[in-house]
Image (cartoon, grey):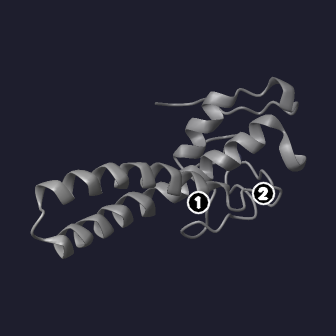
């Protein structure tokens, strides 16, 4: 899905949904072209395509909290089901649950952080 760049200087007129979609793709919330991260979750100083200053973002622990909230709910249901289905193999259940938790959380964290930064930009928070 192609999203047109939002070059609106006034935060009051920025659209939140397209910015969130760009953030979920780990792309710049303003142009959708440049990358937000220059590492796994290390935020780049600026967008390589449009030059948006990304040092103003303050995602902090919010993305990790959201990821833990989502993965924790999924894992709670999964552990309940697996422990009743595989009653004789608790270590296998623990191994499967650990692998599933990592498999969900690792790819989810940068996307949620990108969405956090995009929301802050769309709402004009922290000097964006
Ligand atoms: Zn950009």
Label 1: few (<14), some or many (≥20) within 10 Å? some
Among all residues in the image, which is located at the extreme top?
13
Mark 1, residue position = 64
Q: Residue at x 44, y 64 (%)?
A: 106
- Residue 107's disc number: none
* Residue 61 location (% of width, % of height): 68, 61
Q: Residue at x 11, y 61 (%)?
A: 86
Q: Quadrant of residue 36?
A: bottom right
- Residue 58's disc number: 2
Left-right relation of 75 to 115:
left
* Residue 117 location (% of width, % of height): 70, 49
Left-right relation of 98 to 31:
left
> Of circles 1 and 2, which is in front?
1
| Residue 52 in sight in this render | yes
Q: Residue at x 57, y 70 (%)?
A: 39
Beta carbon at label 2 within 8 Å of ligand 1: no
Distance between mark 1 and mark 2 Cα atoms: 13 Å
Which numbered disc flags the more N-terminal residue, 1 or 2? 2
Vertically, is 45 above or below 112?
Answer: below
The C terminus appears in which quarter of the rendering?
Answer: top right
Per the image, label 2 sits on a secondary structure element best described as loop
* Residue 42 location (% of width, % of height): 64, 68
Label 2: few (<14), some or many (≥20) within 10 Å? some
Front residue (pair 28, 122): 122
| Residue 35 in sight in this render | no
Per the image, label 1 sits on a secondary structure element best described as helix
């Amino acid at each position: 899905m192609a999203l047109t760049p939002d070059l609106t200087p006034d935060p009051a007129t920025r659209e939140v949904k397209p910015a969130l979609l760009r953030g979920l793709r780990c792309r710049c919330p303003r142009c959708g072209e440049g990358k937000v991260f220059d590492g796994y979750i290390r935020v780049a100083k600026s967008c390589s395509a449009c030059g948006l200053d990304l040092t103003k973002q303050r995602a902090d622990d919010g993305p990790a909290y959201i990821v833990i909230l989502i993965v924790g709910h999924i894992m709670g249901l999964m552990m309940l089901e697996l422990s009743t289905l595989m009653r004789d193999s608790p270590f296998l259940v623990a191994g499967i649950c650990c692998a599933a938790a990592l498999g969900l959380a690792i790819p989810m964290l940068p996307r949620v952080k990108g969405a956090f930064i995009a929301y802050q930009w769309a709402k004009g928070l922290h000097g964006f």
